[in-house]
Image: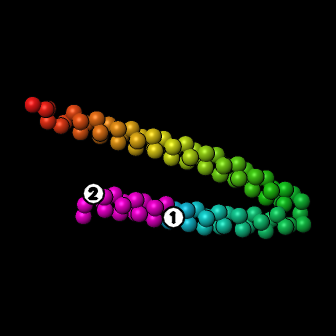
Amino acid sequence: MNEKQTSNSETILSNLKQLNASTEAIEDKVEILHPLLELLQSPDPTLSGYAKRVIELLTAYELRLQSMENTMSETEKALREQSERLDTLLSILEAPAPE
């Protein structure tokens, strides 16, 4: 397998892992939110109030996590670009000197 195929295979594998993680995250959210949604419908205002507040806190937490993930993704992209530039410079430096 050549370098391009290896890179494509690694990208596909990475994307599948991300999809699996996303699916698991959605399943976790459903598992957490389902009982909270039932509590929201409770005739007891204290229970429904608590459920609403927990959902608000979870939403705020998720937004912070997404922001952190975006920052990490941008950092990873910048590091990858820097690595490519360094590889290019290294290949120039390693090239045989002209005679």
Q: How far from the left and from the top, in percent, is residue 3? A: 27, 57
Could you tell which of marks 2 and 1 lies nearer the N-terminus? 2
What residue is rendered at 46% in x and 61% in y?
15
Name the residue located 18 percent from the left edge and 37 percent from the top edge: 95
Q: Quadrant of residue 79 in the image? A: top left
- For the stretch drawn in magenta, the main secondary structure is helix
Percent position (x, y) of residue 12?
41, 63
Q: Which residue is mark 2?
A: 3
Amino acid type, residue under disc 1 in the picture: Leu
Residue 31: % across, % down: 65, 67
Secondary structure, mark 2, is helix
Which of 44/20 is in front?
A: 20
In this rendering, the answer to whether 7 lies above or below 82 is below
Q: Quadrant of the N terminus?
A: bottom left
Taking the spot 73% from the left edge, 50% from the top edge, the residue there is 57
Determine the CA span between mark 2 and mark 1. 24 Å
Q: Which residues are magenta?
A: 1-19
User: Which residue is the site of mark 1?
Assistant: 19
